[in-house]
Amino acid sequence: MVGSAFTSVSFAKSVHASVEKYFRHLIIAFIAFSTIVFLWVGQPVKLLVAAGAVNGLVLPFALAIILSSVFKKDLLKDYRHPRWLSVIGWIVVVVMAYMGVRGLASWLR
């Protein structure tokens, strides 16, 4: 929970300059808020599993975007991405997406 609080507040740094000023306070507030939500819902393990299931769908999506960008010449100039790495990467995207959907479906049952 501490790691997710730090990451979430770190992302907010780009939104407003005052986030940097109150960074530590915001992390503490985020952790306190998360704890209250866990206590209120009463099933923190289920919430953590749900977050993991959603991440299982986000990660293949992010990898697909990265793999799509390696062939844009205007982004990478002289870099030539090996085709075999792309093929393996797309296989990983498909397998991860399949496992993410299966995991989310089994959690929803």
Image: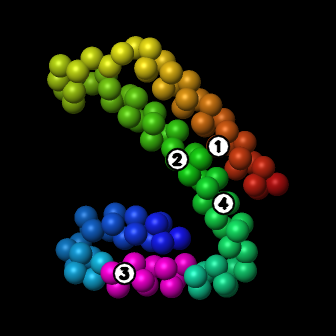
Q: Toward the viewer: 31 or 64?
A: 31
Give the residues drawn in magenta, as a range.
24-34
Instruction: Tell me the distance, in whole angstroms, between the alpha carbons under discs 4 and 1.
Output: 11 Å
Q: Which residue is mark 4?
A: 50
Crowding at mark 2 (Cα within 10 Å: few <14, some 14-19, many 20+):
some
Q: Mark 4 or mark 1: which comes first in sequence? A: 4
The residue depicted at 49 percent of the width and 79 percent of the height is 31
The residue depicted at 59 percent of the width and 47 percent of the height is 56
In-image side of 1 versus 82 (left or right): right
Which residue appears farthest toward the top when viewing the image? 83
Depicted 26 relative to depicted 84: above or below? below
User: Where on the picture, by quarter, is residue 47?
Assistant: bottom right
Q: Percent position (x, y) of residue 11? A: 34, 63
The mark found on residue 100 in the picture is 1
Q: Mark 3 or mark 1: which comes first in sequence? A: 3
Q: Which residue is mark 2?
A: 58
Q: Main secondary structure of the magenta part?
A: helix
Q: Which residue is mark 3?
A: 26
Q: Mark 2 or mark 1: which comes first in sequence? A: 2
Residue type at the position of mark 2: Val
Q: Secondary structure at mark 3?
A: helix
Tags 3 and 1 touching, CB below 8 Å: no
Q: Percent position (x, y) of residue 77? A: 17, 23
Instruction: Tell me the distance, in whole angstroms, between the alpha carbons under discs 4 and 3.
Output: 24 Å
